[in-house]
Image (cartoon, rainbow, N blue to C red):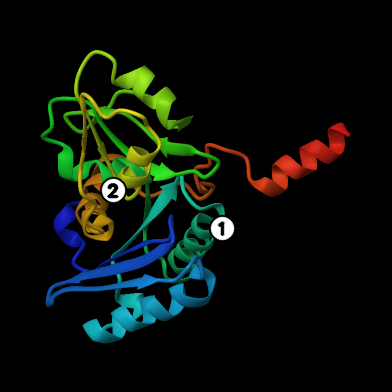
Amino acid sequence: MHAKRFMKILAFDTSGPMLSGALGTERGTFAALQDTGLRHGELLAGLIDQLVKEAGISVKDLDLIVCPRGPGSFTGLRIGMSLAKGISAGSGIPLISIPVPDILVRPYSFYGSPVIPVLDAKKDRFYGACYIGGVRTSEFFDLEAGEIIRRFGMEETILIAGPDAGLFKSKIAEAEGITFAPYVPAAVFDMLAMGPLLFEQKGPDAPGQGPMYIRKSEAELGMEKDYEG
């Protein structure tokens, strides 16, 4: 199977407060970005419907669906993955899900020093991973800003990227040896490019593939606390 087969690719991102989608077709790329305030469950289906109508196709015409695997918003990831799986199963369209840090680091794959894309994990912590030359060199993590600097930034300059690089900067006392990349909300366009290549390398998601959570949800933590009590 060759990547050129995928002429109509739908990508959407529900991992954070912004809801975004892009549809690549032979006629061009159609995109939408909405500041939803985590109302993805109400708006995602409508956003997809808007994109396919603008492109003059139907959902059944899609060749590939791409969505984020995580980490990120627990609710947003569940909503996005559930809808993606529903469309995939109902229409026989292959699905690829991609770890969010892998998506965010793509514009910096040429960078020879450590790059750390970060996402706000709340509670003064950040999700992310470390990459050099676009290759991940650490596990996905859920750490405080200071701990990230201690682990990855003590011996060489690091680049902090991603949607919450500015928030990260506000959490550290000094920024010596650290560069902060301005964030451009273009993840769905990177997903359009990455999806076919990953399909070629690994095939579609396994039927049991679900969101990737690094931290337990508040509900799970609450249940554990009640059990221990």
Question: Where's residue 132, x and y in %?
Answer: 21, 26
Question: To which residue does mark 1 refer?
Answer: 75
Question: To which residue does mark 2 refer?
Answer: 199
Q: Is residue 62 left or right of residue 171?
A: left
Residue at left 32%, top 20%? 152
Towards the viewer: 16 or 10: 16
Q: In this orientation, does residue 32 appear?
A: yes
Question: Where's residue 105, x and y in %?
Answer: 24, 41
Q: Is residue 215 above or below residue 5?
A: above
Q: Residues within 10 Å of mark 2 (few under 14, many from 20)?
A: many
Local secondary structure at mark 2: helix
Q: Is residue 185 left or right of residue 59?
A: left
Towards the viewer: 170 or 185: 170
Local secondary structure at mark 1: helix
Question: Residue 23 falls in which quadrant of the image?
Answer: bottom left
Q: Which mark is residue 165?
A: none
Q: Quarter holding the C terminus?
A: top right
Q: Is residue 222 left or right of residue 100?
A: right
Question: Where's residue 35, x and y in %?
Answer: 39, 70
Towards the viewer: 220 or 163: 163
Tally the marks.
2
- What amino acid type should be assigned to the residue bearing mark 1? Thr
Question: Where's residue 213, x and y in %?
Answer: 53, 42
Question: Residue 130 falls in which quadrant of the image?
Answer: top left
